[in-house]
Image (cartoon, rainbow, N blue to C red):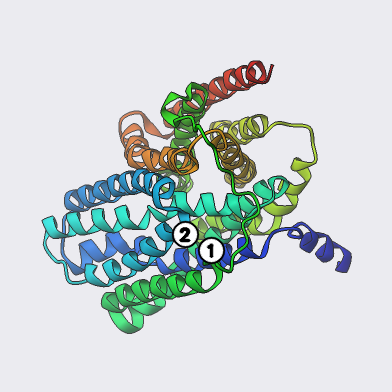
Amino acid sequence: MKNLFQNYLSTFHGLSREVWWLALITFVNRAGTMVIPFLSLYLTDKLNFTFTDVSWIMSAFGLGSVVGTWIGGKLTDTIGYYKVMVRSLLSTGFLFIAMQFLNTFASVCVGIFLVMVVADTFRPAMFVAMSVYSKPENKTRSVTLIRLAINLGFSAGPAIGGLIITTLGYGGLFWVDGITCILATILLIKVLNPRVAKAIDNIVVEHPISVYKDKLFWIFFAAMVLFGIIFLQYFSTLPLYYKDIHHLTELDIGILLGLNGFFIFLLEMPLIKWLEQTKNTKIGLTLLGLLLTMLSFYVLNLTSWIGILAVGMLFMTIGEMIAFPFSNAFAMDRAKKGKQGEYLSMYVMAFSIAHIFGHSAGLRLIDNFGYNNTWYIMVALGFLGILLLLYLKQQLKKEIL
């Protein structure tokens, strides 16, 4: 057992001090956005908005994320990742605090849009910073560490948020959200200021290629949008399927979804380190991750046995663990030939776009065609994504030649 634990810890060796600090800041930031899981409850219970109102507000949420990601990439290439991260975190803190004072439909739509615009400028800047503070051979594992921080933050946030609502009400939730963002800003200034943080792989390109002219990257972008739409069904339509078809309770659903985070925490870093030592390309491994995620929907239609839900969750979790780090690493590698902020903002934006269309599309498909046909449609989308990645893989070989 001791050797097993030491082998697990060894998978984290070699990552820079700055990447560890960035992971801690990301954890604080993600745990701090605890208002997000309770947003729909706050809007309906506290402000008495209708479900139609909430759907429009969530659309403003997604649109703000897309705009913020795009602006974040532009600003990162213009003023640098450090300034973008500091200003984004600090401003987000004050905007979260201000959100509690908005109580009309129009003001909440504008408010949540502005919050997401400002908050999501942080994401491309953070990925550029991670690339700068990572050795080339450690970039994929650095991505994995950041993902662990995000997952832990998202796991801790709702639990803390529920406790705060119980004791302090929704107002306390907005205050704590804002204060944690401000505290994360202070930590960022202390440990990642360019005067004290050591850049390891700071790429300067004299004649950068615009991402908008990189045709191969756009093939990759399309495949990531498809992957995002499929993956997001696990957080919108799948819980409904568990309840309506297999009659699971909320506790059962929570445990099943919790297995995802548990396996990621336990297995992702060792799995990534092992896969890095193979001869597979980043696009080849991304393809494998998409294939496993696609299969997680296909197996649901094979049998009514309740255990198939765990099998599907296992397929999806392994697919997620492989696809996200290696697709992110590919985007960082590709960004070296152009403007890093621009490239990485487009990578993040692929999943923001998936958020806008994925949830509503899945729910509409279920309403019109039923669960089984919806899963087959997700399989078809996954197959299209695999074809795009296969084509991309062949074109990248020609590019090298």
Relative vertical location of residue 183 with respect to residue 47 in this rendering, above or below: below
Q: For the C terminus, which image quadrant? A: top right
Secondary structure state at the residue bearing disc 2: helix
Classify residue 360 by image quadrant: top left
Secondary structure state at the residue bearing disc 1: loop
Q: Residue flagged by tag 1: what amino acid is it? A: Pro
Total of numbered circles in the picture? 2
Give the residue displayed 41% in from the left and 74% down from the top.
180
Mark 2 burial class by Cα count in 10 Å: few <14, some 14-19, many 20+ = many
Contact between marks 2 and 1 (CB within 8 A): the answer is: yes
Near-viewer residue (342 or 105): 342
Answer left or right for 46 relative to 383. left
Near-viewer residue (191 or 293): 191
Q: CA distance from mark 2 to mark 1?
A: 8 Å
Answer left or right for 355 relative to 329. left
Give the residue displayed 40% in from the left and 38% down from the top.
354
Is there any visible trace of residue 298 in the rendered image? yes
Report x, y in % for residue 331: 55, 37
Is there any visible trace of residue 247 in the rendered image? no
Give the residue displayed 65% in from the left and 15% down from the top.
398
Report x, y in % for residue 314: 63, 45
Which residue lies under the disc numbered 2? 82
Mark 1 burial class by Cα count in 10 Å: few <14, some 14-19, many 20+ = few
Q: Residue flagged by tag 2: what amino acid is it? A: Tyr
Disc with the residue nearer the chain's start (2 vs 1): 2
Answer left or right for 301 relative to 238. right
Report x, y in % for residue 223: 50, 29
Report x, y in % for residue 20: 63, 64
Which residue lies under the disc numbered 1? 194
Mark nearest the camera among 2 and 1 is: 1
